[in-house]
Every structure is written in structure tokens, then in C-alpha cells.
Image (cartoon, helix red, strand yellow):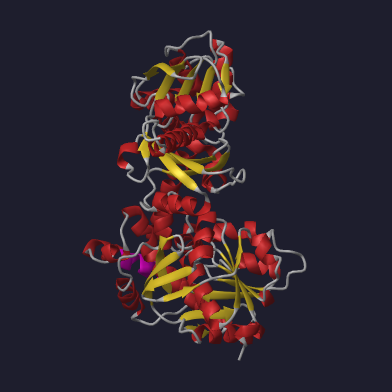
Amino acid sequence: MMDANGITAGIIGLGPVGMTLAVHLQEAGCKVLICDNDPIKTNRIRNEGIILENVIHRKARFQHLYATAAELLAQNPDFVFIALKTYQVESVLKDVPDDNTSVFISAQNGIDVEDVLVQKFSESRVLRMVINFAGNLTEPNTVRITFFNPPNYLAAIDDQKAPVAAGLAEILNSVLLETLPIPAFELTKRVWEKTILNASLSALCGIGRLTMAEAMAFPDSIELIEQIIAESVEVAQAEKIIFPDDFIRSCLRYLKKGGNHYPSLAGDLMNNRMTEIDFMNGKIVEYGRKHYIRTSLNLSMVNMVKSITQKNLYTQYSLAGPSTRKDALYIKKEFNPVGSCYLGIDLGSAYTKFTVIDDAKNVVFRYILKTLNRDKIASRHIINALYAEFPIQYSCATGYGRKNFPDADIIKTEINCAALAANQLLPGEKNILDIGGEDIKMIRCDQEGKVENFFMNDKCAAGTGAFLTEIAERAGIDIREMSRLAAQSDYKQELNSFCTVFAKTEIMNWIFEGQPIENLARGVYLSIGNRVAKMRFDPSFPVAMMGGVIAFHPYLKTLLDEKHALNIVVLDHPQHVVSLGAALMAREAYRALQSKETSLSSPSPQQL
């Protein structure tokens, strides 16, 4: 038997699977190293440990936490469990040191997901695990296990390493995470079996926003699920994978046990993240084509999921550009705070921005989260982590959602917050131009930075981030490339339509005329630039630009400078200017409160 006490096991990826494995391996006696690039999650785990609840009840604290896979892999653990999405694995593998001798275990869903590990390390260093439990995160460090249909399966790709798989299975069995070691030839069958189950329901749940229990509650959806399974089984049989006669019936019984749970792929789709559809329904389609088998239902699921994913990515890039998907959602501690800290929260129509400053007005933290994120407790997770990480004394909420945000100490309008922050970044008289997700604001400030007047666009969402997204999608322009493309054109015509609906029709006419994509991009920017130029502002003072649009559409500034001779200054971190202003408001309010309390506690001359 393999001695757990002498084993070091690394876990890369702390989703429900990674956390569950980490807790059980630690309880079994292994030295467990864990890694995740979400500092909010690792901060909670460092302070409170990992908690498993519902079907499995466990809790464990961990001493060895790493922010990057490179740091963990440098420890050269005996085993490394990869509990990441399939599309994340290649970026991790580039961090493996040349002298690393670890055995890698793929604890992922899908067909052929272990191939990337085999190509990197050879079959002798790769194991594959088929997971038969599932759960959702209810807190950054808490997994609600919704079901466990034992056993899990574990196999070595190279049968000569079967004793290694058997030893690891014994360790997991010793702490009741029932795992069955199987030979390599049986692994293929178990992988297909699990993938067929996932493919039958995951995409459907994501598209329909259904839990497994909801999907299995309606006869119409059950009929569709059954047909997807039958189609998948036909492809598996062509691959010489034979299931028992009652397999489809067994699958339906299994799926009915799933409960009120969103499958992983469904959760990714609903939360605007990339999905693993290519390794689930996509692989069934791929193998079906190999054998000339029509897989219409699986293909429909693949195409619908990809269409929704592509639309989600367009939306994400409209205001926050390429960095939103990963970089901008990564906490960056810019300075060690001096004294107390203050939190500003800008609840915009598309994104919620967080900024923390210290007593010296240094920005020590910035963060961005989609406002319409389906995870309603995401903001609460972030705020809890911030209060744990920084000595925050006071907070201020602003933006569209400020009145529905009870957790802040005070609320202020985004006009006043924008003016306060802009005056710190660019002192003196100025015009502030804020192009956001659904509106455009022009704010006139005096020498002291106080608001003298402000104006807003009166043409619905014309010229805003939402306008850019919808027009770019209709024109077939990659929103990430729009600014670069426009800079390559000298096209003079703008979109004349103020309404987004009519503008989309107008852009289609341009496409039918054969206009190059560069001209389409510049025409859209010309339209926005001309609308901005018509807003009331004092041309004798600089224009300070802020907001998500200018942050990731720099050509708009170039166009405004050239065409309208505006003296434009793009403020640092333009998407976070309003949340910076809110943090400054919180600092001012707290200092005024402290001053008042000091004055009330001081004795009057009469008392003396």
C-alpha cells in the first residue's frame, strides 16, 4: 500500500473538484500544495480553510498555498492533480521546470483531455481520473457537494503504471472518497460514459438556464436528453465501445439524481466564461464525422453554446477590452497601504468597479466585476475579502445601482465622484467626458474641481459601450481589433442613425456596398465622435476622458483630437475613475465624522 504520509500532492485549480480532492488528500495524510490565481479565494482558504458541505461534510486548513502554478511546480511534488478547465492546461504546462519529475493526474471532464499531458510528459507520467461527484461554490472557500455517485475511476495511461493508480485510489478510499482503479482499456469506456452524461444535459442546462432537476422535470426536455444520449451511444459503438442494453435508461436514472445543481459547463455559459463544449458534445461530433454518423443534436448544442459564448465575449470586450477575461479580474495590490483604507464602489450598468485607497490617497487596490453576473454573492465575496485584507474604515457606493447597495456607509452620485477623482488626477478647470455602458456625460468643473454643470446624451444608448458592442457584432468586427482597424482607414462617412436599431440597418447597407472592415470601424467611431462634439463644453479648457469605452478604444481620442481639435487628456485607469472618486468621498466623510466626534468629546470653555 502506498504510504500517504510520505507523499506530496499538488492541486492546480480550486473549483469544486480541486477543493474536494485537496481536503480528502490532506485528511489521508498527504502533504498537500494548492494553487489558484484568485487571491480572494486563496485569502479565504488561508484564513478559514476549505469547507465541504451537504452530501460530503469535511473541513481542512492548508499551509502551502500558491498564487501561480509555477510556484507550486517548483516544489516538484510527487503527484499533481490538474483540476482546471481544458483550455487552461497549456498555459500551466509552460511553467513546468525542466527537472520536474511529478506524475500528472487529469481530473477533468471530456474526451481526450489527457492528450495534452501525454504529449508533454509521455504516457508513463500521466493518469486520468473520472469524477463522479459534483458541487457548486457557495463561498470562495466552500463547496456544496450536490451529489456523489460512487465510485470515481482512476487509471494509468500506461498499464505498467497501474500500481501507481491503485496506490492513489487506496489513499482516497481510506478517507471514503470511493475510487476504483481500472486498467487503461476500461478507462476509454468510463470516459465516454461520463462524457455522454455531461453532453446530454450540460449544454441544455446552460442554454435554458436550468438546473439538472429542472431539466429532468419536463417530459419534453427528457425526450431531447434521451435522443442526445442515443445519438452519442451510436458514435461510441462505432469506436468499439459497447454499453449494456439498458444504458440509456441507466443514464436517465443517473441524471435524475443530479438535484438542484448547475453542471459546470452550464455555470460557465451563464457567467459569460469560456466553456469546454469542444471536449464534450464537440468530441462526439468529431468522432461522428470520423465514422460518417450524423450527430445533429450534439452539433446543435455545440453551435448554440459557441454562439452564446461569442456574444458574451463581445459584450465583455465592449467596455473592458481583452484584459477583462483574466487580467482585469485579478487583484493587484499596487502599494502597501499607509494608515487606514477607504473603499469606493461604482455600480455601473455593465461592470462594478472597486477601488481602495489609503490615508495618503494612494490606490492600493482595483478590481472589476460584471454587474449582471449571475452569481449574486460575487460582490459580497469581494467586499468580505477586502475587509479581511485591508484596514477599511469607510465605504462609498455610486453609479446606477448605488441605492440598491445597502452595504456601503454612504452613497453619492457618480457626477460628484467623477469630479472629485478627476480633480486629483488633473487639477484645475476642465470638462469631464465620461463614456460608459449606456450613457455619455459631460461635466463642467471649476478651478477647485467643483461641479458647475453637467449634461447627458439624450439619444438613448447611442454612442455608448452598448452601442459599440451591438454595431460591431452586426458588422462582424472583432471588438478587440476595432480601434486598430479604424486607424488604418481614412473613411469620411459616419453612421447617421442615432437609434441603435436603425444604425444596425445602416451598417448592413455599408456591408452590402462592399465597404472594407476598416471603413466600417472608422465610420462607427466617426458617429460617436460627432455626437460627443455636439455636447456642450467649454473649448478653452481641457477635456478629461474617462470610462470603459476610452480605456479600450484609444482611436476615439485620436479622432476627437484630429477632427474636432479637442485638448483631450485620458485619465489614468479611466474605467476606475468614478470608483476612485467614491473612495475619496469615503475618506472625506470618515475624516469629517472623526473630526465631529473629536469636537463633541472635547470640553467646552464653560466646562473648564
Q: Quadrant of the N terminus?
A: bottom right
Figure check: 470 above or below 450: below
- Residue 154 is left or right of residue 96, and the answer is left
Q: Nearer the viewer, residue 45 or 85?
A: 45
Q: Residue furthest top?
A: 540
Q: Position of residue 535 (x, y in %)?
A: 42, 14
Q: Position of residue 62 (x, y in %)?
A: 56, 70
- Does the magenta portion include 228? yes
Label count reads: 0
- Does the magenta portion include 163? no
Identified at 41% across, 60% down, the residue is 139
Q: Nearer the viewer, residue 297 or 363?
A: 363
Q: Nearer the viewer, residue 99 or 162?
A: 99
Q: Residue furthest bottom?
A: 1
Q: Quadrant of the C terminus?
A: top left
Name the main secondary structure of what is drawn in magenta.
helix
Q: Which residues are magenta?
A: 225-234
Q: Nearer the viewer, residue 161 or 580?
A: 580
Q: Position of residue 140 (x, y in %)?
A: 45, 60
Residue 588 in view, yes or no: yes
Q: Position of residue 485 (x, y in %)?
A: 58, 28
Residue 401 in view, yes or no: no
The image quarter containing residue 198 is: bottom left
Figure check: 194 above or below 582: below
- Residue 64 is left or right of residue 595, and the answer is right
Figure check: 155 above or below 219: below
Identified at 37% across, 56% down, the residue is 206
Figure check: 295 above or below 330: below
